[in-house]
Image (cartoon, coloured by chain):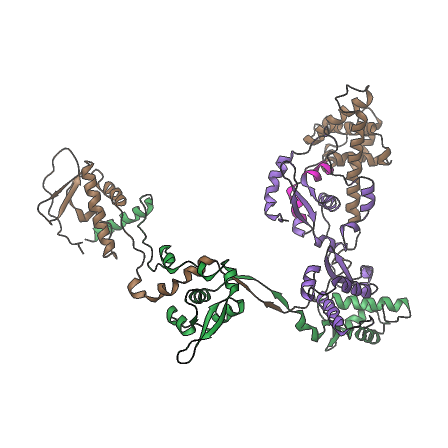
Chain colours: A purple, B green, C brown
Amino acid sequence: MSDAQTSEEMDTALRLLEAILFASNEPVSAQSLQNHLGESADLTAMIETLQAHYAQRGVNLVENDGYWSFRTAPELAPLMTITRQPRRKLPKAASEVLAIIAYHQPVTRGEIESIRGVETSKGTLDILLEIGWIRPGKRRDTPGRPLTWKTTPEFLSHFNLAALSELPGVEELKAAGLLDTRPILATMPAVEDEAAIARDDTDFANWVEEE
Amino acid sequence: MSDAQTSEEMDTALRLLEAILFASNEPVSAQSLQNHLGESADLTAMIETLQAHYAQRGVNLVENDGYWSFRTAPELAPLMTITRQPRRKLPKAASEVLAIIAYHQPVTRGEIESIRGVETSKGTLDILLEIGWIRPGKRRDTPGRPLTWKTTPEFLSHFNLAALSELPGVEELKAAGLLDTRPILATMPAVEDEAAIARDDTDFANWVEEE
Amino acid sequence: MTETPTEMTDQAVESAVPMRPHADDLVVALEGYDGPIDLLLNLAREQKVDLATISILALAEQYLNYINNARHLRLEIAADYLVMAAWLAFLKSRLLLPEPPQDEPNAAEMAEALKFQLMRLEAMQKAAAQLYELPQLGCDFFLRGCPEKRPVEEKPVYFLPIYDLLSALGAPQRRRKPDSYDIKPTKLYSMEESLLRLRRMLGGGAEWDNLFAYLPNMKGHEGLQARSAIASTFAAMLELVKAGELEIRQSQTFSTIYLRGRTDKDEPAPRQPVEDTHNE
């Protein structure tokens, strides 16, 4: 082992962390790692050590919004000839809605509709929910208390993003003021009234996390 | 990466080998690895390099009858145990024993059994001991000097009681019907239950015919 | 599919007399858009200029021509496309005419708002495409292929509501005396029910009959239950006599009771009854 470990104890904890992350086929939350290693373990430092060690290897240690996992290095993709799933191609409306939720979250359905200028069919959100890329967030404190939508850690994991700040072009869009969800102008044709959308949202009420 | 790799090409091949071994859903045969890496690759040397690298880490590269895979280091396996803490209601037998100890303490196991009219399994007392709701008291000055049992302060705090004297008295329990041993009377179907009465009528018809 | 609107709109803008392409082409064309903003954005893209510098007036005209064309062909156009057309016509007039009174929206602001809307949607469409250029799990990178099962140990956390603790105290007693206390829940016949049964059975019939003929089926019933049937029927009978709905007759103490529905004319004496065969 190349990393200089001063004490035998630290060594075992680090090996244990490596083994736990290696054993899992899905990202493990930092909280669960900390629980396993004990309160006194310096998880951040340990993860940094591991991450640095694997940075140039065939597998990398990657974070997705507080979840950690080993995964093969993306740049090896062209060489990896093991069975791969076909790329998931979403319908145009669904990928647009996904992008809007990813870049504007938390965002209400009414806001999604004002950005797209068109009603969002139930099926579109259902597709994204079923894949597990979006989830309901808190209700907005505005009339009708509409539900908001956010992306999940699975979404970040699927696209190999450590955090939402790594979304392509997110900084430029923010700087250009294009991540504003406000309705454009009172006189613009409205899509649907918020009340109707809120009624629709109640179907998802069970999903709402009580934060 | 700590291992000295002289050429960039070798480096990529080794990384690919590592990635393939990591991502495969079953151990991979040397032949299949060779196919992945190309005829010219010195698989034996590469595997040796990888194996040496992982020898002291949390996962090891192991061979099984010509098939290669990463496995958790054997000595770490016991440390990886996941502990779950499901919330469970205390089993009936244990609640009975607990209630008897609470109201009759200090009480011997023999006395508990004579009150319950059934034998008390060792496991029942063990559960209560493990939860920390009971503890052994003094030995009774009778033949055999049996151990007595009492409740603990944890018992009081679980039931939010300041002292044992806060437990309702036996007379109060009787008044509340909690010690009632008689079953409750049930009446025949009410008048509104037309169907039931209609059934009764047909019974009557049969009865008349039988005469 | 997206080619069609391109040709269409170019022609519409260039010539005052619109071409008449095959009707189906236009239907397909409109179906290809996700609403009026998406259509506007596609029309704008054909101008091949930066959205920031695009002429909103020209774009509004292009859209109106497009919708006019579709209307000309008597095609069904979704309401939101028409609402947008009306709004754009309004915007167009505002852009061409002098500024209106102050309380109405300013034309330049309206144009800016529309421009922002287009830019924002375009940004999201681009973002969606860029998202898909990222490496994807299961295609470009992989998680552990053969995960290892970690041993699981369960350490239950027990709880007990105080009610359960208290009622557990009575459990041994309940269990102890099964012989003297094992009474199954008793079914008793109520008077209300007997009233209902008597009324129904009497119906219009006015023949004298033994009271016991009006008891419910007593098979398998005994003791308290059978007695409750007799008692409730008896009480119901008296109740009906009081209400004037039936008559009863008994020749002497403890002899059989006869009853019949009340009628005005007199009936002959009751037929010879079967003597108390059902009396248990």
Q: Is residue B104 left or right of residue A176?
A: left
Q: Residue furthest bottom?
A: B144
Picture layout, residue B195 above or below residue A143: below
Picture layout, residue B104 above or below residue C41: below
Q: Residue furthest right?
A: B6
Residue A182: x percent and y percent? 73, 36
Along the viewing direction, whichever of C34 and B131 lies nearer the viewer: B131
Quadrant of residue A75 in the image? bottom right
Residue B30: x percent and y percent? 77, 74
Residue B142 covered by magenta stretch: no
The reply to whether residue A27 is in sight is: no
Picture layout, residue B199 above or below residue C246: below
Q: Residue at x 85, y 66 (%)?
A: B12
Residue C216: x percent and y percent? 24, 49
Q: Is residue A196 left or right of residue C191?
A: right
Task: Identify the main secondary structure in magenta.
Answer: helix
Q: Residue at x 8, y 47 (%)?
A: C252
